[in-house]
Amino acid sequence: MSPTLKWVLGALVGLPLMCCGCGGMWLRSQFPHEEALARVVNHRQVVQSLGSPVSGAFFFSGRTQSHGDDAVAELKIPLSGSKQDGVLHVKAVQTSKVWGFSRLRVVANDGKVINVLSEF
């Protein structure tokens, strides 16, 4: 394969992937994904149950409704740890661009439920 053809194929494949990746980062910033994970990955009970280190998946499911600077979001973020996996259930409300949480609940694969907000 010629070097020019490799560059053309690389651009045809790489450019859409790069654009989708940037679009995905923008979309993720519209959700409380990062803030929710920051509260959970070092939580004592979550680390005990899932095993250190705990990390959240890049992709998640959920829905959001927004109106101006206000929004409501419900997310399910897969988590993984050294012992087992789990799912972080998030319910959040955004007012004036600030997210507040009414649910941060981790459900481990073994069925254990950890309410992260009970300690705040």
Image (cartoon, rainbow, N blue to C red):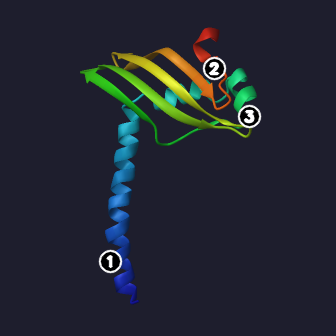
Instruction: Tell me: residue 45, above or below residue 60.
Output: above
Q: The N terminus is located in which quarter?
A: bottom left
| Front of the two marks 1 and 3 | 3
| Residue 110 point in image, percent of width and height | 68, 29
Mark seen at residue 51:
3
Q: Earlier in the sequence, mark 3 or mark 2?
A: 3
Q: How many callouts does the rendering have?
A: 3
Question: According to the image, label 2 marks what residue?
Answer: 113
Image coordinates for residue 102, horizontal then vertical, percent = 47, 12
Residue drawn at 41 percent across, 24 percent down: 74
Q: Quadrant of residue 81?
A: top right
Q: Is residue 84 left or right of residue 9?
A: right
The answer to whether residue 104 of the structure is visible from this angle is yes
Residue ID at (34%, 63%): 15
The residue depicted at 40 percent of the width and 34 percent of the height is 29
Distance from label 3 to label 2 (Cα)?
15 Å
Kindly indicate whether the residue at mark 3 contacts the one at mark 1 (C-beta within 8 angstroms). Answer: no
SS of the residue at dot 1?
A: helix
Tag 2: Cα neighbours inside 10 Å, few (<14), some, or many (≥20)? some
Mark toward the start of the polypeptide (2 vs 1): 1
Q: Label 1, on which residue?
A: 8
Q: Amino acid type of disc 2?
A: Val
Whether residue 120 is visible here, answered yes or no, is: no
In the figure, is residue 98 to the left or right of 86? left
Say what amino acid the circle numbered 1 marks.
Answer: Val
Q: Above or below — where is 108 with respect to 8?
A: above
**Which element type, helix, strand or loop, lies under badge 2?**
strand
Q: Quadrant of residue 109?
A: top right
| Alpha-carbon span between mark 2 and mark 1 | 51 Å
Compute the Cα span from label 1 to label 3. 45 Å
